[in-house]
Amino acid sequence: MTTYETVIGLEVHAQLSTRSKMFCGCPTTFGARPNTQTCPVCLGMPGVLPVVNRRAVEFGIRTALAFGCRVNDACRFARKHYYYPDMPKNYQISQYEEPLAEDGSLEVDVEGGARAIGIQRLHLEEDVGKLLHEGTLETAQASLVDFNRSGVALMETVSRPELSSPEEAAAYLRAFRAVVIFLGVCDGNMEEGSLRCDANISIRPRGSGALGTKVEIKNLNSFRNVQRALEFEERRQAQALDAGERIVQETRLWDADRGYTRSMRSKEFAHDYRYFPEPDLVPLRIDRRWVEEIRAALPELPRVWRQRAVAEYGLPPYDAEVLTQSRALVDYYEAALREWGPAPGARRERPKTLSNWIMSELLRVLPGDDERAISTSPIPPRHLVGLLQLIENATISGKIAKDVFQKMFVSGEDARTIVERDGLTQVADEGALVQVIDSVMAANPKAIEDYRRGKKEAKGALVGQVMKATRGKANPALVNRLLEDKLSQT
Amino acid sequence: MIDRKDVEHVARLTRLALTEAELERMREELNSILAHLDTLRAVSTEGIEPTSHAVDIVNVMREDEIAPCLPQASVLANAPDLSGEFFRVPRIIEE
Amino acid sequence: MHQPIHALTDAYRRGDLTPTAVAEDYLARISALDGKVGAYLTVVREQALAAARESELRWRAGTPRGPLDGAPVALKDVLCTAGVRTTAGSKMLERFVPPYDATTVERLRAAGAVVLGKTNMDEFAMGSSTEHSAFHPTRNPWDLARVPGGSSGGSAAAVAGGLAAGSYGSDTGGSIRQPAAFCGVVGMKPTYGRVSRYGLIALASSLDQIGPFAQDVTDTALLLAAVAGYDRRDATSIQAPVPDYAAELSKGVAGLTLGLPDEYFIDGMDPDVERAVRQAIEVLKGLGARIERVSLPTTQHSLAAYYVILPAEASSNLARYDGVKYGLRIAGRDLIEMQSRTRAAGFGAEVKRRIMLGTYALSAGYYDAYYGKAQSVRTLVRREFAAAFARVDLIVAPTTPNVAFKHGEKEDPLSMYLNDVFTIPGNLSGIPGVSVPCGFNASGLPIGLQMLGRPLDEARVLRAAYAYEQATTWRSRRPDLS
C-alpha cells in the first residue's frame, strides 16, 4: 500500500472592485437585470476597441506589493482564444508572456506553524458573461447568456504547486481572501462570484521527486468546496494509482451536490489558446514612482497586525483572527483603543475588553467582513468606548451595558445619553442598597439558614434577589460585599 | 506541409464547417500560400524585436468612470435568438 | 453638378447651389447609374435629404459648420453607422444594424456632411478587386468589364463615377490607394493612429486605417482633417494636433528631396505604369524637387510578412462572428454545429482561406516561425523606411504594378495578392501614403502615382501631391457612364 503525498496549486480569480469594467465604462454592480450593463465594447460588437482601466492596474499593483511580488517594468495584454458563448469576442483579453507581476508569496497558517506559499504570477484580464442553462448543463436544450459580467476586471494569481493538502489549500484561499478584502481591491463575496478558484492537484508516492500527472478542478466556489473537492480528488487519484491505472491529465468539474468530480474535457488535447500580443492595447510601462506611491499607502496586512496585536496588546490569537476579518474592523478596533487610551494598572485589560465586546456584541449585529457595514456602524468606536468607560467606572453594570448597547445600535445615541434618560445608573449608594439587602434578607430566612449551614450558593440566590429588587441596577460587587458583611454579622 | 488532418484540426479550432471538397481545396491552397510564406525563413532577423504596434505609444489608460450603457433593447435588437432578456444559444456539448 | 467638395461649398456660399439640390442630384445619378457600377450597398435617401436640408439652413443663416457642411459623401460599409445596416460586404452581417456610430462617422455628422449611403467592398476588407463582396461586384466606371480595385472598390468607384463628391474607405494593405489608382481618383491612407479606428470593423488591428477618396488633393485634405485626431476610445490613437492640411497645400515641392525606391520598379510590371510614373517624376523634378535613389531591400519580403500578419489578426478579429449575439445564424443541433455552420455559410471563400491561414499561423508550434518571424521582418521594413527618410522627404513610386484588370481575371489567390506589393510596405510601417492620378494607359485606364511620407507628415505628402496635380490636368478627364 503506497503512501502518497499531494501537490496542489491554486489559481484564484478575484473580481476587482473598480466602479467600471476593465476595458469600458460599464458599471460593475452585481444583480442588475440581464444585459442592462453592457455596451458595444463589452458585447464584442463589430468595430469596438478596449481601453485599459487605470484603477484596475493600480489594484493589481497594490495586491502584487502586498504579496511581495516583483512588479514588472513593462507588461502587455494578450489575446487568449477559445470559443464559449459567454465570451463575446471568442477571445479573452488577458496577459500572457509579460504579466503585471511575478514571484511573490502568501503566508498561510497551517498545522505546525506558517508556510510561505509561492505566488508565481499575477495578471489582469477581463471576466466573461454568465451562462444559464435551461435545466442542467447535461440535459439543457439551450443556454441563456447575460453579458452584464462580461468585461469586469479580473485579477488572476497563480500559486506555485507548494500546497500539500486540501486543508492547506482552503487555508490559502482564506488567507488570500483576507488580504484582498483588506486591501480594498476585492469584496471577497464568494456567493456572488467575486472570488473564484481552480485547483491543480497531483499525487506522487512519498519521497518521489517527480511530479504526478496533474488534474485541474474547476467550480470551487467556497472554502468548504475547495477542501471537499480536493479530498475527493486525492482519494480518487490514489485509488486509481493503486489499481495500476494512469491518471489522465484533464479538467474535472466539482459537483457539490453529488460530492464528486467528473471529467469535463481532456487536457491532453489542451486548449490551443493561440496567444498573441493584443494589438488594440499599447504596452504599459509601469512608472516606479507610481509603484512607490501605492506601496506607501498599503495598509498593515492582516497577518502583520495579528502578530502585533498578540505581542503589544496581549490579545489571544483567536481574537486577532476575528478582528482581521476586514480592514474596517481593524480600523474600528484601533480607533476605539486610541480613544480609550492607556490606563494605569488596567492597561492589559482594555484591549481584551474591547475585543470581547466587539466579538460578542458588535459582530452579533454587523458582519465583520463587510467593509461598509463596519465603517458606517451605528455605534462608532467612540460610542463603544463611552459605554465601556461607564462600566469601568461602575456607573452601570455589565449586564445593563448590554441592554444599553442594543439601544445605542438602534438609536445611534451615545451611552451616557441613554443611561441618564432611562435611569439606568447603577445603584452604588450604600445606604439605599443596605435597605434593599435588609428587606431581602428578611424575606428569605431559609436562604440565610442554608448559608449558615455551609451552602455557599445560597448567597448567590440572595444576590439575585437584590438585583431583581433593584431591577438589575445594583452594583453587583457592592451587593456582594454588603451582603457578605451582613451575613457574617448575624 | 499541411496535411488533411491539420486542416481538419484548424477548421475545428476556428469553428468552420468545411465540406470534403472544401477541405481538400483548402489544403492545396494553404500549402501553396504557405510555400510562399516560408520564404520568410530566409530573412535574417537575429536580434530584431518583433513589431507589435505600428505606433510608439505606451501607457494609454482611462479613469475608472462610469459611462452610459446601451439600452437593453439595443443590446438585444440584433440577437439571432432571444429568451426574454437573455441571448439564447443551442445546447452546449462539452468536447 | 459633380464637382469637388471645395467647389460645392464655394457655390453654397455664393448661393449658386444648395445642399439639397446637390444631394438630390447625386441621389438621382445613383438611381440612374449605380445599376451599372454597383458602388453602393445601401443608399440612405431620406437621411441624406434631411441632412442636406439642415445644412442648407445653416448656409442660409451664414453659419456653416465648416468645409464639409453639405458635402455629399459615401462611406465604405466597413464603418459602423447607427441605425443603418452595416454589412462589411458579408452575408454574416447582411442584416446587422449597429447601435452606434464609428468615431469617423460621428465627426462627419458633426461637420455637417451629407452621408448618401454605404459602399460595396470585398468581404471584411479582404481583397483587391471588390469581387469578393458577398452581394455583387463593383464595376470600374472607366471600363465596366474591369474591377475598380479593392477592398474599398465601391467608395473609389462612387467618386470616379460621380455618385458621391467624396468618400471614405479603409486601407490595410492598399485598400484605399490601389482602388484610387485603378479608378483615377485621389486616395489617402494616413499614418497609423492618425484616424480613430473605433467603429471600423476590424480586419488587421495593427494595419487598418480609415482614409478619404476625393476628386482632387484639396478635397482629400479637407476630408482627412475632418476625421483625423485623437480619440480616447482608441488606445492606438495618436495625440498629436491635426494641422490645417488644406492651408499648407500650395507650399510646393521646391527644396524637397524625393526618394525613388529601386525595389518598386520591378520586372513584370505594366510598362505603361512605369512610363507614366517616370514621367510624373520628371514633372516633379521640373517643379523643383530633387530626386534620389533609395533602397528598401526588405520590400521583397513584405508581401509574405503581410500575408502572415493579416490573416493571423483577422482570424482573431473575426472569431466573434458565430451567430450568438448578432449577425447570421444557421441552425444546428448544438452550439458548435450552429457556430460552424453559421461561419461556413456567412463567410466567403477568401475570408475562410485567410481565417484558416491565420489560425494555423498562430497555433501551437507555429507562432515563432510565422507570426513572430513576420513581425520581426516588419521591424526591418520600418527601419528601412526610417533610414530612407533620413535622406529624403518623401518616397515616390507606382501605386500598383498594373492597371485595373478584368473581372474574373485573377482567380488565383496569390496572383491577387501581388496587386498590393507596392502598398503593403506602407501599412507595415504605419506611414502615410497617397495615390494621385498620373495618367492613363493606351486603353484609357487610370494609373496612380504613390507618395509616402514620414509618420504624421501628411501635410508634406499632400502638398507634394497638390503640386503635381496642379501641374497636370488628369483630373479633368472623367469616365463616361451614360
Image (cartoon, rainbow, N blue to C red):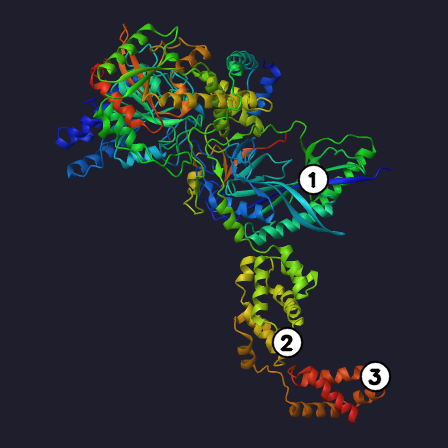
Q: Quadrant of the C terminus of chain C?
A: top left
Q: Which residue is mark 1?
A: A161
Q: Amino acid at mark 1?
A: Pro
Question: Do discs 1 and 3 share a chain?
Answer: yes
Disc 2 secondary structure class: loop
- Residue C85, quarter of picture: top left
Residue lying farthest bottom?
A490
Disc 1 secondary structure class: loop
Q: Which residue is mark 3?
A: A455
Give the camera-side residue of C241 and C315.
C241
Upstream in the sequence, badge 3 or badge 2? Answer: 2
What's the residue at 58%, 64% (across, down)? A334
Chain hosting mark 3: A
Disc on res. B61:
none
Residue C120 visible from this viewpoint: no
Q: Amino acid at mark 3?
A: Lys
Q: Is residue A19 left or right of residue C48?
A: right
Q: CA distance from mark 1 to mark 2?
A: 51 Å
Give residue A92's position: percent from left, percent from top. 53, 35
Q: Which residue is mark 2?
A: A344
Q: CA distance from mark 3 to mark 2?
A: 38 Å
